[in-house]
Image: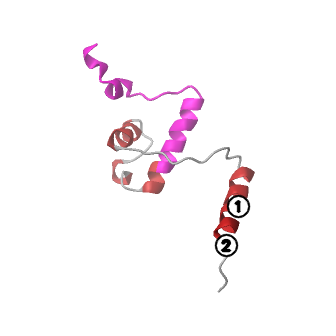
Amino acid sequence: MTHEPTSTVRARRLRERRSRGVVMVAPVEIGAGGVALLVDNGLLKQHQAGDRHAVGEACLEALQQWAEGHGARSVDKVRGSDDD
């Protein structure tokens, strides 16, 4: 079994991402509040909350909806502005 240098693997992944139109890859922390927003907005099922891949896909869908002008429907929960 041959081992490829890590830089070769990283370069291949970068080329694959660029071919799919990915502009940037960035680590993002999603806490309980973010997961709750994804669930409340129907982008994630409650039983998927511990599935990193499902949460990542839901975040991508949320970004896509945001880009199209559709924001979260649970804004008051996020801001806590029920008293305002």
User: In the displayed structure, does residue 35 sit left or right of residue 83?
Assistant: right
Q: Position of residue 52 (x, y in %)?
A: 44, 55
Q: Could you say which is closer to the camera, residue 77 or residue 24? A: 24
Q: Kindly give the residue lying farthest to the bottom in the view shown.
A: 1
Say if 1 sits above or below 19 in the image: below
Q: Which of the colour schemes (rainbow, by chain, secondary structure, one colour) is used?
A: secondary structure
Find disc 2 in the rendering and name its residue: 5
Residue type, numbered disc 1: Ala
Q: Position of residue 36 (x, y in %)?
A: 34, 40
For residue 21, the mark is none
What is the secondary structure assignment of the residue under circle 2?
Answer: loop
In percent of the image, x 69 and y 56: which residue is there? 14
Which stretch did the figure color magenta?
56-84
Q: Is residue 18 magenta?
A: no
What is the secondary structure assignment of the residue under circle 1?
Answer: helix
Q: Residues within 10 Å of mark 2 (few under 14, many from 20)?
A: few
Find disc 1 in the rendering and name its residue: 11
Counting residues from the start of the chain, the first of labels 2 and 1 encountered is 2
Q: Kindly give the residue lying farthest to the left in the view shown.
A: 83
Q: Position of residue 66 (x, y in %)?
A: 54, 31
Image quadrant of residue 39? top left
